[in-house]
Amino acid sequence: MDDLDPEQKHVMELLEADLSRIYPIFENALALYNSEITAKARAEHDDTAAAKAMHCHVWAGFQRAFLDEPGYTFLEVRGLKVLNIRDQVVLRAKKVDVNGRHRNADTAQQRAFDAQEDIPGMPPAATRVVIGYQPDIAFSEVERVIIRRPKGLWVSQIVDVDEDIQWVDITPVELPLQSGERRAKNI
């Protein structure tokens, strides 16, 4: 792990003790969505409605796991819900695609979060990361859970290895740009 991004190593070391509590939150949230919302209602949900319902279940799961834990603070800043961990890491839960990327409404606050800029109401020194889940196409199981530094700088996947929850670096290797090429906007 010596060749890891130093920020990734720092963030993941801070979160390592919590991974066994974080990982099941996503599976439990999807199981709740599929067991307690009727099949008829789920059939009428578009991707946005399903993701929003899942987000509500995930947020409640984080609160059940960490609400009374010293050093863990739930913040809502102008509608943005995040978990502040010891003023060092701010987690935002999102659905991600196969590439581990999330989608957002393009707002100044969202751009500031992804760019690690100060946002009033959030600890300025904390690294802002997205903790994302990728559901299968049927929205029946979670294929993977990732922690990603926005702007594509690094990505870690949380994995269950014989009931031992760990993380691995899955940051994609960037190919060098050809002269005249521009890098695509990466969130």
Image (tube, helix red, strand yellow):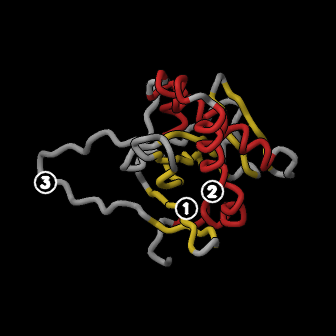
The vertical placement of 78 against 100, above or below, is above
What amino acid is found at the position of numbered circle 1 in the picture?
Ile
Q: Residues within 10 Å of mark 2 (few under 14, many from 20)?
A: many
User: Which residue is painted at 63% across and 38% down in the image?
Assistant: 35
User: Which residue is painted at 66% across and 61% down in the image?
Assistant: 19
Q: Nearer the viewer, residue 176 or 33?
A: 33
Q: Nearer the viewer, residue 75 or 131?
A: 131
Q: Position of residue 98 (x, y in %)?
A: 37, 48
What amino acid is found at the position of numbered circle 3 in the picture?
Gln
Q: Position of residue 174 (x, y in %)?
A: 28, 59
Q: Secondary structure at mark 2?
A: helix
Single out the residue that lies furthest toward the left. 179
* Disc 3 target residue: 178
The vertical placement of 141 against 106, above or below, is below
The vertical placement of 187 against 7, above or below, is above
The part of the image, by quadrant, that contains residue 172 is bottom left
In the image: residue 38, left or right of residue 3: right
Q: Secondary structure at mark 3?
A: loop
Q: Secondary structure at mark 1?
A: strand
* Disc 2 target residue: 23
What amino acid is found at the position of numbered circle 2 in the picture?
Tyr
* Disc 1 target residue: 158
The first of marks 1 and 2 along the sequence is 2
User: Which residue is painted at 47% across and 41% down in the image?
Assistant: 139
The vertical placement of 88 against 51, above or below, is below
User: Which residue is painted at 66% across and 42% down in the image?
Assistant: 124
